[in-house]
Amino acid sequence: MIDPIAISVRLLQATSISDDSIFFDLTKPKYKSIDYYRIACHILFNCKRCGNCCTTSYPIRLNYKDIVRIAKYQKIPANKAIKKYAIPDPEKTGIWKFKHVMPCKFYDAKLKSCRIYLERPWSCRIFPFLGIYDTEDAIKINKSCPGSLETASILTEALKKVSSEPLSCSCSKEEAKKAKEWFRASLKETKKF
């Protein structure tokens, strides 16, 4: 079980000092505080398996890495996966979207789950808190997703509790760096994202 209090403590540590003050390596992405909040939401998120995202989301966008993962999972070449599942997205250069949507071609209505869950596109991985990391200034919660509403409530309550404790928001630069690295590792390593 994931402890919202522990996540909140790390979140306050990670957001206490900007990435610019911690990471000097130009190859590392610099995240804003909101990105750490978004990652915390994803860590705490518990899908209710309502199927709303898989049956009503449009468009479901794909980048080339998504196509390669899906192709590998389907045991077909990437160019065949593009022909079979994708069309170019006229709004975004170098991006595709699924041909068949609403419901998604990979949604299994009987099981209420995704048949390619571990290989699902990035746009599905960041749902329901939407946004591409380091590009938006707010977490966008999808109101049709009961899991996102629950997560927002859990994180808000945990942050209130932690923030009310004395010295909860102070930490050293090293603690802030460790917290930031923990969130980055969570984003990178878990199949949930």
Image (spheres, rainbow, N blue to C red):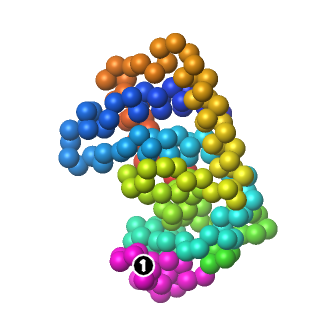
Mark 1 highlights which residue? 91
Q: Nearer the viewer, residue 125 or 41?
A: 41
Q: Position of residue 57 (x, y in %)?
A: 62, 70
Taking 28 as reference, is 160 left or right?
A: right
Q: Residue 63: image x %, image y %?
A: 42, 70
Which residue appears at 56% of the width and 43% of the height? 41
- Find residue 45 and report its image quarter: top right
Residue type highlighted by circle 1 = Glu
Residue at 36% across, 45% down: 31
Residue 88 appears in the figure = yes
Given residues 16 and 5, the one toward you in this image is 16
In magenta stretch: residue 81: yes
Q: Position of residue 140 (x, y in %)?
A: 55, 54
Indicate left or right for 98 with 181 as reference: right
Q: Is residue 188 above or below residue 17?
A: below
> In this rendering, is residue 154 above or below 170?
below
Q: Is residue 170 above or below residue 35?
A: above
Residue at 55% from the left image edge and 62% from the top image edge: 124
**Residue displayed at 61% across by 35% down:** 156
Q: Which residues are magenta?
A: 77-100
> Is residue 114 magenta-colored?
no
Q: Quadrant of residue 56?
A: bottom right
Q: Secondary structure at mark 1?
A: loop
